[in-house]
Amino acid sequence: MRLSPSAIEDLYWWIASLPTAYNEVSHGSPDIVINTDASLSGWGDVLNDLTCGGHWSLVEQTFHINYLELLAVLYVLQSFQGHLEHKHVRALIDNTTAVAFITHIGTSHAGLCNRTTKTIWGWCIAKHIWILTAHIPSVENVGADKEPSKLRDETEWMLNRPIFNRVLEILNLTPDIYLFASRLNHQAERYVSYQPDPQAVAVDAFLINWKDYDVFYAFPPFSLITQVLQKIQSQQVTGLLIVPDWPTQIWYPKLMRMLINYSLLIPPQDLKLLYLPYNPAKIHQLHKTMWLLACYLSGDVSKTKVFQSQFPSISTSHGEHLRKSSIALTSVNGRFSVIPEGLIQFHILSKVP
């Protein structure tokens, strides 16, 4: 009989582990109970008052539901790592196959499921987590079952990657943290999510110190732009912020006064401006009209003053002029903005192939 490479690897593991192996008679009652669930579109979990979840990537969407149920367990454990370390955890799963695979620490019937199960156990061992599973009927798995269906598109839109890379190239920037991101749409290795996430370095950008990073990148929900600018000012940090070019918004003048370099005006790129990573065919509802601004800005007043000193002066001829309504002329060509310190010129980003 010839053994497979994975079987030989398992034998070596047992040879190395048996001398120090022991089994507790009982681990007692679980310290924490988690409910996990997966569908063909996404995954979710409920832990007390906390929730987590997300869509599957395009590749993940092609896998069998048994594998997705195991992947959901792994993502949930990683998302709630801080709550689960050194704990006895019971995972309630409404898929009997996934329960059996985790209970038996693997399977000989499905290689991908076997590897994922071993990854779950290896991760738990490293975090000093003892995990037990139990089956819960789908009709009783109410909280976790709702999470995949509650997922919204608004938080997952991302700037198309070629456009993003072109912006970084022109501004000569390398952000070291991506704020307001997720497992699927982050464009920097380290990112901060809006809810518990299996790969995020932190949760909720407003609760962390942005001074820990040299240059941040943020493409926040539009409703949070005012709060983002306040955070930048209060912590005097520097970074790249993507916002819609909406000059009539209340936050727009403050944004202009925080710039430390000329902004890039990003025109609509046919259907390519914004990208939904788990559903690329979906088109943003503002794709025909929305222009974006890539703003390199800072809350450090000394940096903004250096940039403002480069502004061209504004002049007008002497004499009286009849004042006319300027409402119709607000940012007609989209290439300039004005603040008391001077005239700000935007650079228009050429279309990216």
Image (cartoon, rainbow, N blue to C red):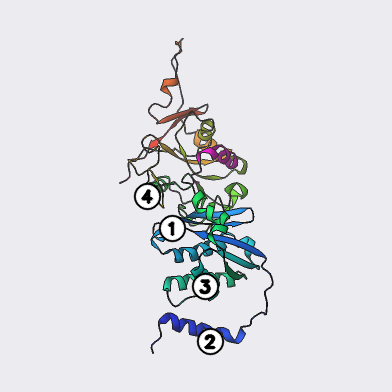
Q: Say which residue label 1 marks.
A: 40
Q: Say which residue label 4 marks.
A: 280
| Helix, strand or loop under label 2 | helix
| Helix, strand or loop under label 3 | helix
Amino acid of disc 2: Ile
Highlighted magenta segment, given as a residue range: 218-232
Q: Say which residue label 2 marks.
A: 15
Vertical relation: 99 (above or below) 339: below
Which is more N-terminal, label 2 or label 3?
Answer: 2
Which is more N-terminal, label 2 or label 1?
Answer: 2
Rounded to the nearest whole Å, what is the CA distance between mark 3 and mark 4?
A: 35 Å
Residue ID at (59%, 56%): 46
Amino acid of disc 1: Leu
Crowding at label 1, few (<14), some or many (≥20) Cα neighbours within 10 Å?
Answer: some
Q: In screen coordinates, is 294 left or right of 77?
A: left
Observer-side mark, 3 or 2, equals: 3
Where residue 30 sits: x, y (%)?
66, 68
Where residue 190 sits: x, y (%)?
51, 56
| Residue 150 shows in the view | yes
Where residue 279 sits: x, y (%)?
39, 50
Pointers 4 and 1 in contact (CB under 8 A)? no
Pointers 2 and 4 in contact (CB under 8 A)? no
Q: Say which residue label 3 marks.
A: 100
Q: Is residue 230 magenta?
A: yes
Q: In screen coordinates, is 281 left or right of 263?
A: left
